[in-house]
Structures are given as C-alpha cells and as structure tokens.
Amino acid sequence: MSTITRINRSIAQGGLVLLLLAALLGAAVISPTQARPADKTYIVDTLTDGHDSHLADGICHNGADGCSLRAAIEEAFTTYGSTSINFDPSLSGKTLRFKLGPINWAASNTLLDGETNKIHLSGEDLSPGESLLNI
C-alpha cells in the first residue's frame, strides 16, 4: 500500500470518527449559509426616540407610541441569548432622529437590520462630535 493511499485512508477515517462523535453528542450539522434564528426579536414600529418604559420585561415599548429603536436596544441588553432588531415595513424609507442623544450599545449577540426596509438614521440632532451609537 502506498504512502498516499495510507494518508487518504487515515484522513477519511478521521473524518468518519468526527462525524460519529458529532452524532453521538447530538450535535446538529448546520451549513454555513443557515443562520440560527434569534431567541428574541423586537420590531421597531415608531420613529419616536424614547427609552423603554419597563426595562427587562421582554417587551419593547417606549411608554408612548410603540417600540422605538432606543427601547429595542435597551431591551436587547437585558435579553438572554441572541436578539434581532428589525423595523416595521411602515417605516420603510423614513428617517429616525436621535432626539435624546447617542444610544449606548451594550447589547451583545444582537443583529440590527435597517437594510431590509431602508431605514435612515440621522444624527442631525446630536451635538457636534457625538456618534449615533456609543459602543
């Protein structure tokens, strides 16, 4: 048996061992193009800039007219697991202004999707030199 044949068999057996180990451990095989769904999704449905009215209750609401981007990010910070923040289609093409100053982005494992509905973020109400998000 040639050296190349032995190496190929060794690699094939190693791959089989890893596949069997994954099956025994109950691991799921997910292709790189499949995304794991978020554990929690917040839908921003207002352009009003307001804080979440009841932080850490799992409900995004600014206490006035719906789920603001600021409230969604604040709730995401208190949410265990992955979080997705999307925008309601009724806001498509509209501009969100940060009237209350920059948003502190303390959330980890959070996806913010403003691309799907073409949301525009404006810092025109911020002081010179301020960023939209403090990370």
Image (tube, rainbow, N blue to C red):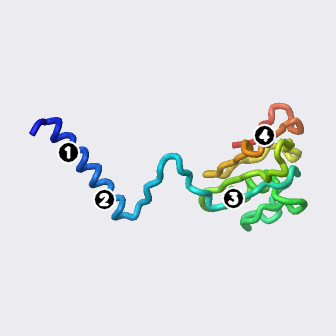
Q: Residue at x 40, y 64 (%)?
A: 26
Q: Image quarter for residue 134?
A: top right
Residue type at mark 4 is Leu
Q: CA distance from mark 3 to mark 1?
A: 46 Å
Mark 1, residues whose alpha carbon is within 10 Å: few (<14), some, or many (≥20)? Answer: few
Mark 3, residues whose alpha carbon is within 10 Å: few (<14), some, or many (≥20)? Answer: many
Q: CA distance from mark 4 to mark 1?
A: 56 Å
What SS does tag 3 mark?
A: strand
Which residue is farthest bottom? 57
Q: Nearer the viewer, mark 3 or mark 1?
A: 1
Q: Nearer the viewer, mark 4 or mark 2?
A: 2
What SS does tag 1 mark?
A: helix
Residue type at mark 2 is Leu
Q: Image quarter for residue 1?
A: top left
Is 115 located above or below residue 44 in the figure? above
Q: Residue at x 23, y 50 (%)?
A: 13
Q: Nearer the viewer, residue 7 or 39?
A: 7
Is 80 located above or below residue 16 in the figure? below
Say which residue label 3 marks.
41
Q: Residue at x 84, y 51 (%)?
A: 90
Q: Nearer the viewer, mark 3 or mark 4?
A: 3
- Which callout, 2 or 1, points at the residue further toward the start of the chain? 1
Q: CA distance from mark 2 to mark 3?
A: 35 Å
Q: Residue at x 84, y 48 (%)?
A: 91
Say which residue label 1 marks.
9
Mark 2, residues whose alpha carbon is within 10 Å: few (<14), some, or many (≥20)? Answer: few
Q: CA distance from mark 4 to mark 2?
A: 48 Å
Residue 83: x and y in percent read 65, 56
Q: CA distance from mark 3 to mark 4?
A: 22 Å
Q: Is residue 94 visible?
A: yes
Q: CA distance from mark 2 to mark 1?
A: 16 Å
